[in-house]
Image (cartoon, helix red, strand yellow):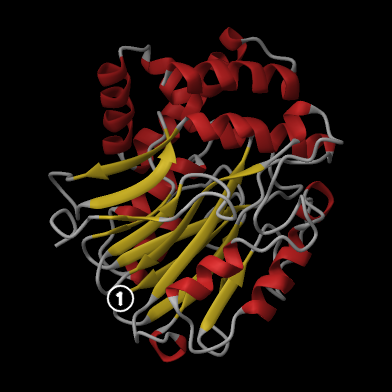
Amino acid sequence: MQRSIEAYRDLFAYLTGWDWPHVLAEARPFEEPIADYDPRWLEEIEGIAEGAGVPVEDVLALNVRTEVVYAAKARQATRLAGACTAIAVLPEASASGETLLAQNWDWYPHSLDTVVVLEARPDDGPAFVTVVEAGLLAKAGMNAAGLGLATNALATDAVSGRPGVPYHVVLRAILGCETISAALAAIQRGIRASSASYVLAHSDGLAVCVEALPGGFSDLHLLFPEDGTIAHSNHFLAPAFSRKDVSLWAMPDSPFRLDRARRLLESPVLVEDLQRVLADHANAPNAICCHPDESLPEYERGVTAASIVMELDSRTMVLADGPPCTTPYRRLELGELLA
């Protein structure tokens, strides 16, 4: 947790010029939208802070890090380090007949030191597991109801930094849902502060990618599988999208990662096939498997901090704790938790 706080103190200073007290002041107005959306997530933020022995204001700031970083970079229209690739495979395209969900999560290199596997048994929702930075509520993961979540941050001119429901709070709400329609309702509820795509899949054989702008229920676009698969990276794909897509300026590798993932996917898809796609180096170092670009300033370099493949029917996950080209995948034993 201390490493997360220290890393973001330095990162925010580079991106915004703000010192940590200023960051805390910028984060504070997000507390009210979170409480209006669901006060349970504020309680979880308070619990994380208590467990880690750090001020709750620091943990709140970590959970609005996307709003701070992306608002700053969208205004500047400069390069972003966070570039993720997500893939969903329906049973008809899967060699095992299972619904599969996979993601490379790319972020700043400090996240290699701060990624944790969080296993949770809430009192009022399904048990879940999420691969996330220490101090944040949730990221990619799956729950005991068979719902899986992968995600890509997006950037548009609509991102202003105004208080709303933070990205990581929406992610936590999704993992508390039992059906894919309930997850869509969670994304729609409240006024979102950030743009993102949410790739949702369920063990009952459904999948959808929800592209969301800042705003309410009308600021969403749904993309459904083609030939049994969905692939998504860090730019908008919906034909109805009509805003300025800063993503393509800030993350110019995004369309090439998307095209590469689509071309490498061949049915029937095995878990090992997804691992191979996620380790691909076309357009390196800014490939699906991302490595720091030494030609860029330190705080504009990205790396694949975690690579995840989920088998939703059997509630299993394989995880590489870093770039999958060099980091072996390990199978997480989640049967008891997600039974």
Residue bearing the label numbered 1: 203
Q: Quadrant of residue 60?
A: top left
Q: Position of residue 275 (x, y in %)?
A: 52, 66
Choose between 136 and 87: the one closer to the eye: 87
Q: Can you say whether 308 is above or below 136 in the image?
A: below
Q: Can you say whether 333 is above or below 28 in the image?
A: below
Q: Quadrant of residue 107?
A: top right
Choose between 253 and 176: the one closer to the eye: 253
Q: Can see residue 42? A: yes
Choose between 324 and 3: the one closer to the eye: 324
Q: Is residue 236 left or right of residue 322?
A: right
Task: Tell me if mark 1 has few (under 14), some (14-19) or many (20+) residues whose alpha carbon lies within 10 angstroms of its own.
Answer: many
Q: Residue at x 25, y 20 (%)?
A: 51
Q: Position of residue 291 (x, y in %)?
A: 70, 45
Q: Quadrant location of the C terminus?
A: bottom left
Q: Residue at x 48, y 64 (%)?
A: 102
Q: Position of residue 217 (x, y in %)?
A: 50, 60
Q: Quadrant location of the N terminus?
A: top left
Residue type highlighted by circle 1 = Ser
Q: Quadrant of residue 169?
A: top left
SS at circle 1 = loop
Residue placed furthest toward the right? 295
Q: Is residue 197 left or right of residue 201?
A: right
Q: Residue at x 42, y 91 (%)?
A: 92
